[in-house]
Image: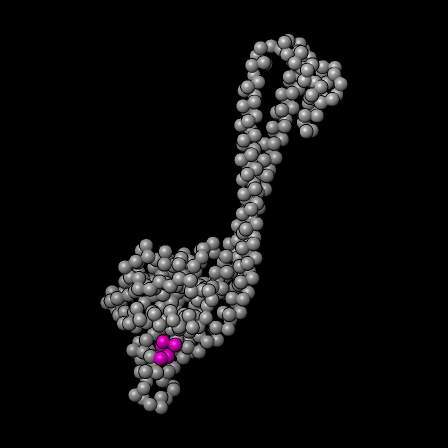
Amino acid sequence: MALRRAAGLLASRVLGTPSAGLECAAPYALQHLEGIPSTLQTSTPATSSTEQVRHAGNLAVKQRIRAIKNIGKITKAMKMVAASKMKNAQIAVESSRGSVDPFLRLFGDHPAVTAPKTATVAVTSDKGLCGGLNSNISKYTRMMLQLNQAEGETVSEQTVASIGDKGRSQLTRTHGDMYTLSVMDAFKPINFAQASLIAEELLKQNPDAEVFRILYNKFVSAIAFKPTVATVMMPNVMERQAMEPTGNKLDTYDMEVPAENKDALQDLAEFQLAMTLHNAMLENNCSEHASRMSAMENSTKSAGEMLSALTLSYNRKRQAAITTELTEIIAGASALEDS
């Protein structure tokens, strides 16, 4: 409207008509069209097509700005949701660590222990949009399998299992023939009963496995988490490991019935597997929320930067269009005045 008003005032001054806008100036402009050269008269269709292209370009930029604004709102909301969930998950992680630490003090941590038959369990998430959380676990799982294959004499058979849909989709492409178990939707909610069922199914699908290696992301802080390997040994490996200098402290305890030593070790190994899985799922779940919060914060920041750049570009194009239209009006008015 401001552009039309300015054009009307300019035309009224040039043509000597009252300043009533383009509507009043139009009849006088039409009367003077007969004196305009033919080149100026035939240039109208080209100008209108140029304006249409310019308008279409501005409209596309405006639609993109609107889309980026919506994406920024979504990522900001997802960041707030992830931050809220991370606080609750962190409390559950801190309480579960007290159940796993006694096993580490009793049996020790032996990630380099080897056995003829091993099972590797990758704990990942069911959802994405959480940075490189799942790809790191898949990468370390492949490295672990390659190390076991390099020790061909000591490791004759190895299997793979995964908890979470993302680990399954990444590992089945490269090690689908080794898969024995895939668990999905195991994080709603996470409790010890569910971890016990997964441990029971792992033992059922891998009855001859002597060593279980569980890979997961251990929560450190809101901006840090590290891939971790937890090793769970079965009774025969525990007895063999106890003979070595880095063995466990199980021999310091006397069994009331020595004949039941093997059964007690089997129960302890199964209970340790369930507790380790429970802790690994909680740790990975908390790391997932922390990683998603960081990823959504970066996405929101990137959307803001892109929005600023597009807004600047849109304003420049809009100002250039206004300047071009004013130049055309002034040129037309000058041509009318000269005629």
Task: Please report the bounds of the magenta region as a residue range.
Answer: 267-271
Q: Position of residue 247 (x, y in %)?
A: 35, 78
The residue nearer to you, when weighing 43 against 227, is: 43
State the quadrant of the C terminus: top right
Q: Is residue 305 visible?
A: no
Residue 174 drawn in magenta: no
Tell me the chief SS of the magenta region. helix
Residue 128 shows in the view? yes
User: How is the structure coloured here?
Assistant: one colour
**In this orientation, which residue lies closer to the viewer: 160 or 191?**
191
Q: On the image, which quarter does residue 187 sit in?
A: bottom left
Q: Residue at x 36, y 56 (%)?
A: 169
- In the image, what residue occupies the spot 45% across and 57% down? 127
Residue 197 place in picture, x, y as percent: 38, 71
Q: Quadrant of the N terminus?
A: top right
Picture residue at 32% right of the left edge, 72% below the top: 203
Determine the image quadrant of residue 235.
Answer: bottom left
Q: What residue is shown at x 32% (from left), y 82% (from top)?
A: 263
Q: Residue 206's spot in the image, x, y percent?
A: 30, 69
